[in-house]
Image (cartoon, rainbow, N blue to C red):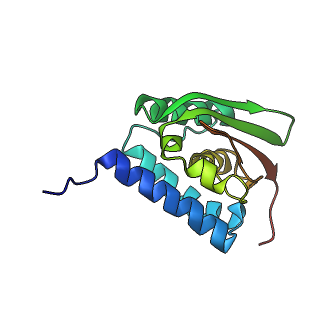
């Protein structure tokens, strides 16, 4: 009898498909964020996350990362402000990287799916557009810089 894939294996497959899709289509992060940021409160609200009016944007992101770390899928996350408009999201360890998808896509221009979620929260928390740099994929995680703009022409 054939074994069915576990939930974690299915998530890894979907993660790899998203990376491959991004690489093939070359979708800019700003176009993705418009749609993702509208759904963030609804999606992450199911896990106890809400955007709090007047809260520092970094604190909103850090609360989201804490929830995501509690799932066991992420470890050693760091979100910091580099300057007035620029932020950096470091994902030290991602259980999805175990699938070796980073090795396959290392040379591609892709965005870590978790960085898209982080940028979407940043966009909603600040009311400003966020542009992501391509994620630097590491063996166990990624590093993604993002910058705030008053508006972005798509």
At horizontal 51% and vertical 52% (from top left) the residue drawn is: 40
Q: Splitting the image into 4 quarters, where does residue 89 fall? A: top right
Rendered location of residue 68, percent (x, y): 47, 36
Picture residue at 61% right of the left edge, 38% below the top: 141
Q: Position of residue 34 (x, y in %)?
A: 63, 64
Taking 53 as reference, is 50 left or right? left
Quarter of the image that includes the C terminus: bottom right
Left or right, 143 with reference to 82: left
- State the count of labels: 0
Residue occupying image coordinates x 42% and y 31%: 72
Q: Residue furthest left?
A: 1
- Where is 87 relative to 19, above or below? above
Instruction: Residue 18: give x, y in percent of width and height.
Output: 53, 61
**For this rendering, which residue is in front, 56 or 138?**
138
Residue pictured at 31% horizontal, 48% vertical: 7
40 and 53: which is toward the camera: 40
Which residue in the rendered view is the most extreme toward the right?
Answer: 83
């Amino acid at each position: 009898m054939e074994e069915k894939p576990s939930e974690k294996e299915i998530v890894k497959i979907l993660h790899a498909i998203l990376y491959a899709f991004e690489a093939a289509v070359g979708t800019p992060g700003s176009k993705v964020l418009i749609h993702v940021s509208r759904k963030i409160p609804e999606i992450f609200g199911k896990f106890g996350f809400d955007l709090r009016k007047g809260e520092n944007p970094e604190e909103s992101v850090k609360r989201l990362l804490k929830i995501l770390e509690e799932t066991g899928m992420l470890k050693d996350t760091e979100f910091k402000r580099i300057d007035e408009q620029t932020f950096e999201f470091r994902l030290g360890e991602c259980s999805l990287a175990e699938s070796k998808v980073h090795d396959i896509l290392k040379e591609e221009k892709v965005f870590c799916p978790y960085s898209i979620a982080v940028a979407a929260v940043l966009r909603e928390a600040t009311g400003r557009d966020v542009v992501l740099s391509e994620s630097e994929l590491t063996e166990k995680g990624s590093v993604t810089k993002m910058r705030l703009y008053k508006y972005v022409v798509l």
